[in-house]
Amino acid sequence: MAVYETILTERRGDVLAITLNRPDRLNAAPPLMFDEIGAVLADLDGARAVLLAGAGRAFCSGADIAGGALGSDNPGEATFLALTEHYNPLMEAIAALPVPVVSAVRGPAAGIGCSLALTADFCVASESAYFLQAFVNIGLVPDGGASWMLPRLIGRARATEMMMLGERVPAAKALEWGMIHKIVADEALDAEAMALAERLAAGPTVALGLIRQGLQHAFECDYAAAMRNEAENQRRARGSKDSMEGGMAFLQKRKPEFRGE
C-alpha cells in the first residue's frame, strides 16, 4: 500500500484498517488527512469491511486549524472551502461505500472527529471515549454532517444539548442514548473492533452494502419510497452468489460460506 503523511493503512485479511496517525496532536485532522482517507477508500481492492481507528490516546480531536492550516485573510471562506472540498467529500464517500464500516474510539471524538466516528455503521468505544460537539464554545456551528446525523441517531433534544451546550458525552451516556454500538475496556478496544470488522467482512457483502445504503435512503424518503427501494435492493441481493449459498446452507443445515459476491 502507498505511504501517507497522516494515516496508516493495513490490509488484515478482508478488512481494510485505516488509522489516523497524528498521535502527538490527538489525531487532529488537517484537510490532507481526509483527502488521504478518501484516496484509500476510492479503491477497496476487494476489502469487504473497513475499520477506522486513531493512533495513541485519541480517535480524533477535531479539525486541525492550528498553525494556519485553515488560516486566511478570510477565515470564513477558507473554512467553507476546507469543508466543501476536503472534509465533506470524505463523509459522503463513506456513506456511499458498498461495504460495512466499523470505528474504534478511545479518548476524544470531537468536532469533525465525532462526525467521522459516527458515520460508521458500528461505533465501538472504549471506557475512556467521549463524544463532543464543542463548536459553540468557540463561536462556531457543527459541521461534517453532524446537524443531519445526530438528530437521527439520538433525537432532536439530545442533539440540541450536544450542540448548544458543548459538553462532553461520555461513552456510557452515548451508549444509553443509542449513539454507539457498544463499550469495551480500553485494553480490549482494538481486538473487539477488529473482531467485529472481521465478522462483517465474512458476511454477505452485497447484502450488507445494500442494507447500509437502504438505511441511508430511508432517512431521506417516505414510507412507500423506502419499500420500493427495499424491493429493488432485494432483487439485487437475490441475484448474488452469496444469496444462493445462504439458501443452500439453510436447506443443508450448515453454516454458509459467504465470498462477498
Image (cartoon, helix red, strand yellow):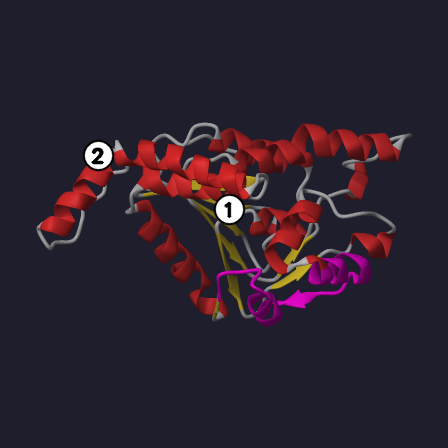
- Region of the chain picked out in magenta, as a range: 157-182
For residue 113, side relative to residue 37 (left or right): right
Q: Is residue 27 visible?
A: no
Helix, strand or loop at mark 2: helix
Q: Main secondary structure of the magenta part?
A: helix
* Residue wearing tag 1: 19
Q: Quadrant of residue 258?
A: top left
Q: Residue furthest left?
A: 252
Residue 206 lies in magenta, yes or no? no
Callout in the foreground (1, 2): 2
Task: State the residue position of label 2.
Answer: 241
For residue 32, what is the image quadrant? top right
- Between 25 and 153, the residue placed more toward the observer is 153
Q: Residues within 10 Å of mark 2 (few under 14, many from 20)?
A: some
- Residue at horizontal 33%, vertical 31%? 236
Amino acid, disc 1: Thr
Compared with residue 58, is residue 44 higher up or lower down, i.e. above or below?
above
Front residue of 163 and 218: 218
**Rendered position, 163 above or below 5:** below
Q: Position of residue 146 (x, y in %)?
A: 68, 48
Q: Quadrant of the C terminus?
A: top left
Query: Residue at (51%, 48%) from the top-left corner?
Result: 120
Marks 1 and 2, the one that precedes in the sequence: 1
